[in-house]
Amino acid sequence: MIEEELTYKIRGAIFAVYKELGPGLLENIYEVALIYELKKRGLQVEQQKQLKVYYDGVLLPVDYRIDLIVEDKIILELKSVTELKDVHFKQMLTYLRIAKKRVGLLINFNTDDIVKSIHRLVL
């Protein structure tokens, strides 16, 4: 499945979770609900996947985790904040670069309009 098709399916799952739960809950609640919804739609999901970080060719002894990776192609970074800041977008671009992935979705569930709170970033 190509990334555009995956993104479409993921957005449908996000909409379903938001419709059921609404805004204002903790990120981990949305994470668990979204995992359930993605798997229900037949998608493979990895949760809190540890990412190896290298500096100057040396593996750093850090515990660095990504919220979700769908079908080993798309990174999902979930937020439940008043507003997304520039640092959130920069963080996603860094995740994509380090994980060697091309597409990521930055999602803020603490919103009145979930459509405007899903941001697709591409490297």
Image (cartoon, rainbow, N blue to C red):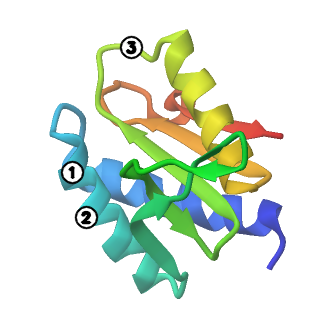
Q: Residues within 10 Å of mark 2 (few under 14, many from 20)?
A: few
- Label located before the other in sequence (3 or 2): 2
* Residue nearer the viewer, 44 or 9: 44
Residue 49: where, in percent of width, then height?
44, 65
Q: Amino acid at mark 3?
A: Glu
Looking at the rendered structure, the secondary structure element under dot 3 is loop
Residue 111 lies, with reference to residue 55, above or below; the image says above
- Res. 32 mark: 2
Residue 80: where, in percent of width, then height?
29, 31
Q: Is residue 24 left or right of residue 30?
A: left
Residue 64 lies, with reference to residue 123, above or below; the image says below
Tell me the distance, in whole angstroms, between the alpha carbons under discs 3 and 1: 18 Å
Q: Residues within 10 Å of mark 3 (few under 14, many from 20)?
A: few
- Label located before the other in sequence (3 or 1): 1
Looking at the rendered structure, the secondary structure element under dot 2 is helix
Q: Residue at x 59, y 24 (%)?
A: 89
Q: Residue at x 43, y 82 (%)?
A: 39
Residue 16 lies, with reference to residue 91, above or below; the image says below
Q: Are marks 2 and 1 in contact (CB under 8 Å)?
A: yes
Disc 3 versus disc 1: nearer the observer: 1
- Report the residue marked by disc 1: 28
